Amino acid sequence: MAPALSQSMEGLHVKRRALLVGAALSGLGFEARAGVTPSAPLFVITRSKNANVVHYEARLAASGALDREQPIGAYWVMRAEDGRREGLTWLEERLAYGWSASFDARGELLVRLRAFSGRALCVTRAENGAFCALLRIDGRPAALERIHVASDGGGLTPSVRYVDLFGTTLADRRHISERILPTGVAAGGAPHRR
């Protein structure tokens, strides 16, 4: 076989192996793109302001375990525009959509969102092999799927009317939700007056 043809065939085998590995990982909910750390979706944040969505993902090491250096990633999907993927800005990471993450003594990843630091999330691998973010929703252990923020106004500090948490309970796999009102807001959503 000619050397050029042999190299071409070898290149096809490498590409085919990469496609097979990528397909296998995507079947488990992992995302693998050339030059990008493999990842697995965790949850999203939607907003009343527009259709843009922040996606949070577990970043994975080559072994398939959580990456010890950068275990969490986040990015926008600009649905209100053209659907492109866009990274968070420095200000967004520091204020609204950022997080702190650390591994505890048992090796579990604990995550606190900057704008929602009252409840820690525990990122772990579920029985089906997919990664998920666990927390209590309406008092029950659940896998978080979505956080929805309803707000008024714009600018750097919009006024939050409420935050809804959506997930699936661990015990019976039922959909569950919880509405969280900011301090000083009555159950009907109107500001509480003394």
Image (tube, rainbow, N blue to C red):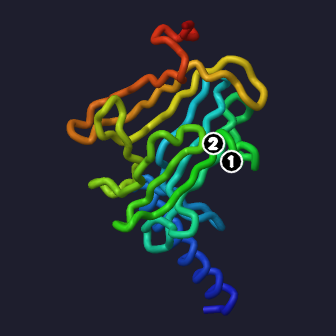
The quadrant of the picture occupied by the N terminus is bottom right
Marks 1 and 2, how far apart at CA:
5 Å
How crowded is the residue under tag 2: few (<14 C-alpha within 10 Å), some, or many (20+)? many
Find disc 2 in the rendering and name its residue.
97
Residue type for callout 1? Glu
Work out whether 21 lies above or below 47. below
Q: Is residue 155 left or right of residue 4?
A: right
- 32 or 91: nearer the viewer: 91
Q: Tag 2: residue type? A: Tyr
Q: Is residue 50 left or right of residue 155?
A: left
Q: Residue at x 48, y 8 (%)?
A: 188
Q: Residue furthest right?
A: 155
| Residue at the image position 64 percent from the left and 86 percent from the top | 7
- Which disc number belongs to residue 93? 1
The quarter of the image holding the C terminus is top right
- Locate residue 147 relative to residue 90 in the image: left or right: left
Q: Is residue 65 above or below residue 171?
A: below
